[in-house]
Image (tube, rainbow, N blue to C red):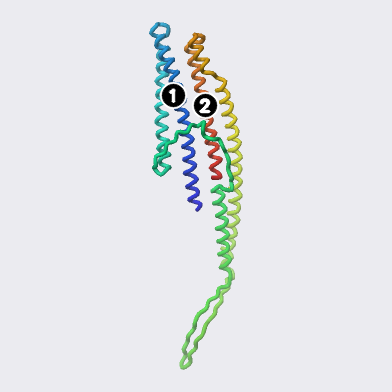
């Protein structure tokens, strides 16, 4: 049943996208938890420096505001993860489901067989229905036979017997036959158009997927080249200022956030490809 397949595909696709979004937020939670440790450490150091008279009230206030913003971002992330968990539970027949996967753990595999596409199956079904309709219209043009029993009485004479009649359609079904032929042609054109459209969509999505994979690799390489330990040690040895430390730490965690955003985008692209042939 095409409607059942369409509904099934829609539910699976929605669930997959929610899982990707939840996995992204799980990874983001890990990054935020790690980042706030550094922000707290810096805020405490700034407060001590302020109390000692080495830091201005503006610098100290900015650091405290940064800490507040970080905590607010963590709270927003927690609320979003709860919402996504509830959405998964709804799609799972209201049965509780826990999803703790991180976005880095989702396999980036994109593979689709367009012959399994529900849209193409529907177009093929329309051709079958059009051919069946054509067969009906052709049968209506064949001669029709009718058999009956006759009994007549006229005066003293009585007549009994069977009657056989035949009717031959001449032109009353010609129009409907042509219409049925037109329906077949339209269904075939629709199937060809659907196949071409899905093929073009698949090709463009695959190119987009490869491009996103390359972007992920480049961001990951940039992160690997950054050593946060050396930045922390440089601050402890007074080799860099607190402002420089904050900028370096922000850059590092922003790169990590960019990386999981790129992974999320790539996973969504892969899911769009896989959904075509699901």
**Foreground: 54 or 94?**
94
Q: Residue at x 50, y 45 (%)?
A: 9
| Residue 105: x %, y % from top left | 51, 32
Q: Is residue 131 left or right of residue 69?
A: right
- Give above or below for 87 relative to 61: below
Q: Secondary structure at mark 1?
A: helix
Residue 217 figure quarter: top right
Residue 98 visible somewhere in the drawing: yes
Q: Nearer the viewer, residue 199 or 186?
A: 199
Q: Which residue is mark 1?
A: 33
> In the displayed image of the protein, which residue is found farthest to the top?
53
Q: Residues within 10 Å of mark 2 (few under 14, many from 20)?
A: some
Residue at x 60% of width, y 34% of height: 210
Mark closer to the observer (1, 2): 1
Q: Is residue 62 visible?
A: no
Quarter of the picture containing the C terminus is top right
| Vertical side of 64 occupied by 213: above or below | below
Tell me where residue 71 appears, x and y as whole percent.
Answer: 40, 23
Q: Which quarter of the figure has residue 68?
A: top left
Crowding at dot 1, Cα within 10 Å, few <14 / some 14-19 / many 20+, comes out as few
Q: What's the mark number on residue 42?
A: none
Residue drawn where x is 50% and y is 48% of the image? 6
Asked if labels 2 and 1 touch by Cβ distance under 8 angstroms, the answer is no
SS type, badge 2: helix
Q: Earlier in the sequence, mark 1 or mark 2?
A: 1
The structure residue drawn at horizontal position 61% and vertical position 40%, both measured from the top left corner, is: 203
Percent position of residue 59, x then y: 43, 12
Mark 1 and mark 2: Cα distance apart in space: 16 Å
| Count of numbered tags | 2
Residue 164, image x, y percentages: 54, 80
Residue behind mark 2: 258
């Amino acid at each position: 049943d095409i409607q059942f397949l369409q509904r099934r595909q829609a539910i699976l696709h929605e669930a997959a996208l929610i899982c990707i979004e939840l996995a992204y937020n799980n990874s983001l939670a890990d990054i935020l938890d790690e980042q706030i440790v550094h922000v707290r450490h810096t805020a405490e150091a700034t407060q001590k420096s302020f109390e000692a008279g080495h830091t201005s009230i503006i610098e100290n206030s900015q650091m405290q505001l940064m800490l507040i913003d970080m905590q607010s971002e963590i709270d927003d992330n927690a609320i979003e993860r709860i919402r996504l968990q509830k959405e998964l539970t709804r799609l799972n027949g209201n049965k509780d489901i826990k999803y703790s996967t991180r976005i880095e753990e989702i396999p980036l595999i994109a593979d689709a067989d367009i012959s399994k596409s529900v849209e193409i199956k529907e177009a093929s079904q329309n051709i079958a229905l059009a051919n069946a309709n054509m067969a009906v219209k052709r049968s209506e043009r064949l001669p029709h036979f009718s058999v009956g029993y006759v009994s007549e009485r006229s005066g003293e004479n009585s007549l009994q017997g069977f009657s056989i009649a035949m009717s031959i359609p001449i032109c009353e079904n010609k129009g409907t036959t042509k219409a049925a032929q037109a329906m077949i042609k339209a269904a075939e054109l629709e199937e060809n158009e659907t196949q071409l459209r899905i093929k073009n969509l698949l090709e463009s999505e695959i190119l987009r997927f490869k491009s996103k994979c390359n972007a992920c690799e480049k961001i990951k390489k940039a992160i690997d080249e950054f050593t946060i330990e050396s930045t922390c040690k440089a601050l402890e040895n007074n080799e860099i200022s607190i402002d420089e430390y904050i900028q370096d730490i922000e850059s590092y965690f922003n790169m990590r956030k960019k990386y999981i955003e790129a992974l999320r985008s790539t996973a969504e692209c892969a899911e769009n490809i896989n959904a075509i042939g699901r």
